[in-house]
Amino acid sequence: MCYAVVLSIVWCAVPEPVIVPPSIDHVLVCDVNNDLHLDLFGVRYVHDAGNSTSRPDDPSIDFDATERAYWINVLTTIDGVNQLAFDVVAQNINSSPSSRYSQPELTPSPTLASPQSHAWVDLDGDCMADLVVTSQSQSGTDADSTASTKFIEIWINHWRDGPTLHSINPLPAGSGQLSFADVDSDGNMDLIVPILTPNHANNEIRIYYNRAKQLCGSLYDFAGGESNKPDADGIIGCRPEMDLCQSDPNFFFDFMHDPRQNDDGGATSGSASDTDSSGLVIYRFPASTTGGHLFDPYNPQSAPWQSIEASPLTLRFGDINLDGWPDLLVTLTPVDGANYGVANLWLNVPCQSSGGAAQTMKESVVCSPRARARGRRVFSASSVSQANKLLSSTAPGAFAGATFFDIGDDGYLDVLLTSIQPPRNLFPTRHGPEPGTHVSRAFINGFDTDAYFLTTLSSNGVCPAWCDTEPKFPNPKPYGVNMVGATFKYVLTDLGGVKRIGVGCQLVQSSYLSLPSPSSTFGLGRSNTFIDTFAYGLALNRTTHWRSWLSLVPNAQIIVFPYPPSNPDEWTAELFVAPSQQLVWVVISWAATLTIIALIIGYLHLKEKREDEKEKRKHELLFTF
């Protein structure tokens, strides 16, 4: 029997939802034709050699095949009224990969992974979001631990042609939902993958670093600032600060096929089918320990009582202490064998020797010598043990989501938890909502830090002010909506005089309760200066698709309006400066200082006036005599 996901869009311009041609699974929101109109990517049913239909509930139609497809947004205006519709176009999977780092003889599979973790994120550094697809072979299942059937496809977004196939590589067996973050703050988005093996035997979290150009003059610039000098990884040159959105077509991740086949002493992964290179950091959760393991509410073995609404395990990242490196929020079981999970917060710390980093839940940390030499990062829970006790003290459940969110809009990321209440017989001493009820909780960030932050948000290209085709003075001011895949980069000089770079992408995933933050929050650490350079770009069907600004004030929120899309030089940015936490004391000090100065001035004025009166009387007596 075939099932379809009926897609509907609630559009404010019409009273009824717009029904979209159905998809088999969750879809990815993206912009594949770079026109600033949101498109979709997924799998559709086909019938009679490719003729599509939008009636999966019709029993007279035999859906005997599927294909990967784009839902292209064809918003049109008829008689002054916007009409929303979608053209479903099959994705061309007959092309060959363009990268030398692609696994030989692999071609795109027509079958996508389910659950999938597609993404719309910039990987080659050109500030245009690229398409990441998770597919699987038609034979085998993800539960098979002896061979990998899951693949990652990277489709580089070209301004004229849209996504074109860059590389295909197999993922380790048991790979879960993909996550993306700039773990080591080198200006390139890295890949993080949880490995979920049967019976929780040697579950792992792996970080695959993006080997791409570094910022010239930064800590990671191993090319010495020379544009044509290759470093130890074969990466040629670096990115100048005035060209932060320079593309690097030769980027690659640690897991990719390397035609050079050079062994640089990477860590051993424990799997004969995996080849680890120098940048790979692995967390292992041995099943023999009593410390628990990764909790996946989507797996019936993890929580047999769970609701079908539960989503697969997703690792989420956010800089909760604003030190400049993103931290990790992960769901673990408190003890081995438990069928419920609790949220854990791990802080981003420098990579140490094996076992040298602080431990939590008995996980083992593996850092290769070369990874330590290149300044790679790992995660530790020891410094936030009290916070994790608070997170785990709440009523347990099948976590539907644990994510970062700035509740107070003050630049400090908080934690939101959403769980499904377990049956009474599992926790008879606990009192609360009925089993199956969704419960949401918020944990306010209480870190006391003097570090700076920068919150960024991209609009979708609406005209924000006086425009030719819009009302002269719109009220309220149109801000549009958050644009998927928008890329932000910044360069900052720290207290040691070293250039630091960070990168973030907005709303990169949209499936299986991925819960991305609507804006990007960067921790800037401690600094005594302005943000040197801030760059912003998004997918546009033109050669120039980004703009940069100089000397921005930290501790602020910046909203970028890419209007008009045809001329990035006219794009505007609004800067909202956050008031200091010590504002009350600043006002009191300012008032006290003014009061003291006023008293001093008054006293000196009174003293001078008395001396003038004495002098006047003296002259009057002398004149009388």
Image: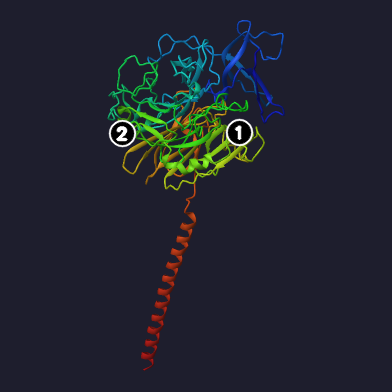
Q: Is residue 280 above or below residue 108?
A: below
Q: Earlier in the sequence, mark 2 or mark 1?
A: 2
**Along the horizontal axis of the image, is 409 left or right of 202?**
right
Q: Which of the pair 531/271 is nearer the observer?
A: 271
Return the mark for residue 536. Answer: none
**Along the horizontal axis of the image, is 275 left or right of 329?**
left
Query: In the current view of this chain or complex, which residue is farthest to the top?
Result: 48
Whether residue 298 is visible, yes or no, is yes
Q: Secondary structure at mark 1?
A: loop
How many numbered discs, if any?
Answer: 2
Name the residue at 54% across, 13% down: 111
Q: Which of the pair 609/122 is nearer the observer?
A: 122
Q: Secondary structure at mark 2?
A: loop
Query: Which amino acid is tagged 1?
Result: Leu
- Image position, residue 608 (x, y; %): 39, 77
- Image position, residue 178 (x, y; %): 48, 25
Tell me how the rendering is colored.
rainbow
Asked which quadrant contains residue 600, the reply is bottom left
The residue labelled by disc 1 is 426
Asked which quadrant contains residue 511, the reply is top right
- The quadrant in which the C terminus is found is bottom left
Query: Which amino acid is tagged 2?
Result: Gly
Q: Is residue 591 above or below residue 143?
A: below
The residue labelled by disc 2 is 217
**Along the horizontal axis of the image, is 19 left or right of 118?**
right
Task: Give neighbour class at mark 2: few <14, some 14-19, many 20+ (Cα, 10 Å).
Answer: some
Distance between the alpha carbons at the discs numbered 2 and 1 = 57 Å
Q: Which of the pair 15/267 is nearer the observer?
A: 267
Whether residue 553 is visible, yes or no, is no
- Image position, residue 585 (x, y; %): 47, 58
